Amino acid sequence: MLEDFEFGSSMPHRVLEITQERATAVRLITTSGKVDKYVALSDRWGSSESTFTTKKTLRDRMTNIAFEDLDKMYQDAVTVTTKLGLRYLWINALCIVQDDEEEWKAQVAVMGSIFQGAKLKIGASSADDPALGFLMLRNVLMCQPPYREKPGKPDGVMYMRHVTGHIDLDVGLAPLNQRGWVLQEHLLSRRILHFTKEQIYWEYRETDYAETILT
């Protein structure tokens, strides 16, 4: 499903470029309308503005952004983007200069096309604040019984867990969905990975999947 739209879309004005496989080298770049594949993050902003890109920090961030200086949520988004084999990531708080009123108005006007053009949207459903992140250890009841296709030595281990949660509850009532903008981001996105406190949900067109229900 990620193979669709293989050649990408016209990227937003500015994106994060991940330049190493281990996501340790990140910087902002101006795309000049370059066509490529990118991921967009849908997140709930916290009260701190310390990590926002501003006129003062823009030049340095076009050179390098230390991974450890990013909020945990943005670190998680970089990690997921890298694991998916993609290089470009759009995050509102970082890719738009927040104290540039002219740029802000121009980017808000095309916000819908940013999510529509993304190869994938990451929905940070479980996170109340960027400092907390959305990749977390979960208290999951799981068993790992061995299995064998033929008599003899086990061929491997199956992972089994209790069916829990529902996308309408885990996503619909999550902290992220208390934001008004999320409805537009949701409706226009081609594919969505929802990271909730219970599990990950994959939403694609009229179909959705969960870790505990794959069909």
Image (cartoon, grey):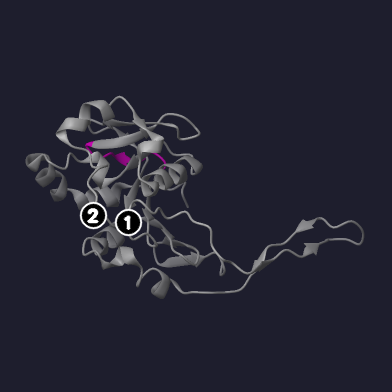
In front here: 130 or 183? 130
Determine the residue positioned at 36% across, 33% down: 17
Q: Which mark is residue 154?
A: none
Left or right side of 171 for 149: right
Between 125 and 54, the residue placed more toward the observer is 54
Residue hosting label 2: 47
- Image quadrant in which the C terminus is located: bottom right
- Crowd class of label 2 (few under 14; some 14 to 19; many from 20; radius 10 Å): few
The stretch drawn in magenta includes residue 7: yes
Badge 1 element: loop
x, y percentage for residue 102?
7, 40
Residue type indicated by callout 1: Asp
Find residue 212 and report its horizontal and vertical position in percent: 57, 68
Q: Of helix, strand and loop, which mostly describes the magenta segment?
A: loop
Q: Earlier in the sequence, mark 2 or mark 1?
A: 2
Choose between 129 and 171: the one closer to the eye: 129
Element under disc 2 = loop
Q: Are marks 2 and 1 in contact (CB under 8 Å)?
A: yes
Q: CA distance from mark 2 to mark 1?
A: 8 Å
Which amino acid type is marked by label 2? Ser
Q: Is residue 2 left or right of residue 163?
A: left
Say above or below: 199 vs 83: below
Q: Quadrant of residue 134?
A: bottom left
Residue highlighted by disc 1: 129
Magenta-colored span: 6-13
Q: Is residue 163 left or right of residue 108?
A: right
Residue depicted at 39% across the width and 56% down the height: 191
Count neighbours of disc 1 (C-alpha within 10 A) and say few if under 14, some if 14 to 19, many if 20 or more.
Answer: many
Q: What is the x, y in percent for residue 25?
A: 41, 30
